[in-house]
């Protein structure tokens, strides 16, 4: 919950909060259950075979494909199957076919596994600071499509250490969970749209969180989480407009989310909507509420060209104090400084993304959009900002990170450009 200004929190908590077994060769899961004496209708998919697995366990690879059981093989679009495989994050589809089996049709899928264990060096440079970090990530821990991250970052004004493990559900009716730890010591700086410093003070932040996600249907999930946050304010004679005191809060955050995806042969598009409510009980300092709504709508217009809409709303009724204000990334816009601070946001980014070329390593694309954001807070008041943004994205096919990107945004109100390096599921 505290706070968006640590780059690694942005990169990893948003990116990945999405014992190896060799099962290469032909892998056939348990067939669909049929009642005694009842034959399945002809041409209906009753079984799934997956080949090409090395580290990934069969049940983890099979789960995203179980939605096709009971479907007609004649009407099956192979791109739907490819989208489900790619959406797993750790597998790339090689071939999709159906074949007659002893009891119905068999869906046969051949896959390649991505590289899922890798060190990630990070360098982030802004007009005010430079940060350096190193993280060790495993995006297919134990062959279960789980994600584990351990690492830290350092700059002249801050340092941060974090660890996270995200357990992914691999069958219906089984919840997943996410546990995270983060400690951040930094000099926090809050600015307005013109990057003028309005508040500056040192703060030490400890965050512990545990979230549980339960799949209700193929596309809808319910979630609930509990968190512990402690923010301590060391004495500093040079601090500017610091909060009166630190805080200790215990958070409770239920939520609901929808997600679907499609594949046009060039770009993996998603449609998602999440609603999350949080109540944060102040053991020290005030209690407060917050509501966060985020959505993405991507639609292929022709293969390799898609409409891209994203945005959201962030609301803290009555305000929650400066320690709990947030930045514009909550509503997926890039035209405000990452140090901009407000209590409430409503943002929208609308544009088009075009595939440029594809190699064995991945796909390069370019996106042009127009962004608008309405914000309000005790520092900058209520203001409306808008402007264009351009992004270059590289979707990796060999490495299990969804994408790398470089964003350039321009605020028509302030006349200032903003540069953002992105990695992970923020695409």
Image: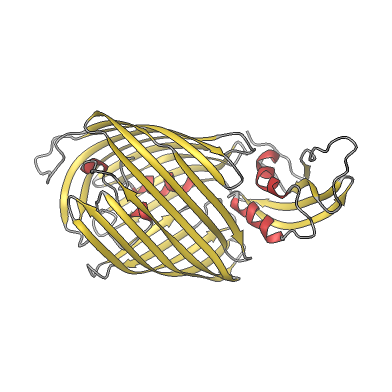
Query: Is 76 positioned to the left or the right of 7 in the image?
Result: right
Which residue is located at x 64 percent, y 38 percent?
172
Quadrant of res 374: bottom left
- Note whether residue 6 is visible: yes
Quadrant of res 239: top left
Query: Is 48 positioned to the left or the right of 147 in the image?
Result: right
Whole-percent x, y for residue 300 in the image:
57, 67
Colouring mode (rainbow / by chain / secondary structure / one colour): secondary structure
Which residue is located at x 60 percent, y 59 percent?
262
Front residue of this view, candidates 275 and 267: 275
Front residue of this view, candidates 182 and 125: 182
Vertical side of 97 occupied by 13: above or below: above
Which residue is located at x 22 percent, y 33 percent?
286
Quarter holding the N terminus is top left
Query: Is 357 positioned to the left or the right of 229 in the image?
Result: right
Which residue is located at x 68 percent, y 52 percent?
112
Vertical side of 422 occupied by 23: above or below: above
């Amino acid at each position: 919950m505290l706070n968006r200004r640590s780059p690694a929190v942005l990169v990893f908590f948003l990116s990945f909060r999405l014992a190896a077994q060799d099962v290469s060769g032909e892998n056939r899961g348990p067939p669909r259950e049929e009642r005694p004496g009842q034959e399945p209708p002809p041409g209906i998919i009753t079984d799934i075979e997956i080949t090409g697995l090395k580290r990934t366990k069969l049940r983890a690879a099979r789960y995203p494909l179980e939605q096709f059981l009971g479907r007609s093989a004649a009407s099956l679009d192979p791109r739907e199957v490819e989208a489900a495989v790619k959406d797993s994050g750790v597998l790339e589809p090689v071939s999709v076919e159906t074949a007659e089996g002893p009891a119905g049709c068999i869906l046969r899928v051949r896959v390649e596994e991505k590289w899922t264990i890798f060190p990630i060096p990070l360098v982030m440079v802004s007009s005010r600071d430079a940060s350096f970090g190193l993280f060790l990530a495993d995006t297919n821990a134990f062959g279960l499509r789980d994600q584990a991250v351990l690492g830290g970052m350092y700059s002249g004004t801050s340092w941060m250490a974090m660890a996270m493990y995200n357990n992914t559900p691999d069958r219906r009716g089984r919840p997943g969970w996410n546990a995270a730890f983060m400690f951040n010591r930094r000099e926090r700086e809050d600015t307005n749209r013109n990057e003028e410093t309005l508040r500056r003070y040192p703060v030490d932040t400890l965050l512990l969180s545990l979230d549980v996600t339960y799949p209700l249907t193929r596309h809808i999930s319910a979630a609930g989480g509990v968190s512990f946050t402690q923010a301590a304010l060391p004495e500093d004679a040079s601090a500017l407009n610091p909060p009166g005191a630190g805080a200790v809060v215990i958070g409770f955050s239920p939520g609901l989310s929808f997600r679907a995806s499609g594949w046009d042969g060039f770009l993996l598009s998603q449609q998602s909507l999440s609603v999350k409510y949080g109540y944060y009980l102040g053991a020290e300092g005030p209690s407060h509420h917050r509501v966060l709504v985020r959505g993405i709508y991507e639609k292929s217009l022709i293969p390799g060209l898609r409409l891209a809409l994203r945005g959201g709303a962030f609301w803290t009724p009555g305000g929650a104090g400066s320690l709990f204000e947030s930045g514009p990334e909550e509503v997926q816009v890039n035209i405000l400084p990452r140090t901009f601070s407000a209590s409430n946001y409503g943002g929208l980014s609308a544009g088009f993304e075009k595939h440029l070329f594809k190699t064995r390593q991945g796909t390069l694309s370019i996106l042009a959009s127009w962004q608008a954001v309405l914000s309000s807070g005790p520092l900058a008041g209520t203001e409306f900002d808008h402007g264009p943004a351009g992004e270059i994205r590289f979707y990796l096919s060999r490495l299990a990170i969804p994408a790398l990107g470089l964003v350039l945004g321009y605020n028509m109100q302030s006349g200032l450009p903003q540069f953002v390096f992105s990695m992970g599921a923020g695409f």
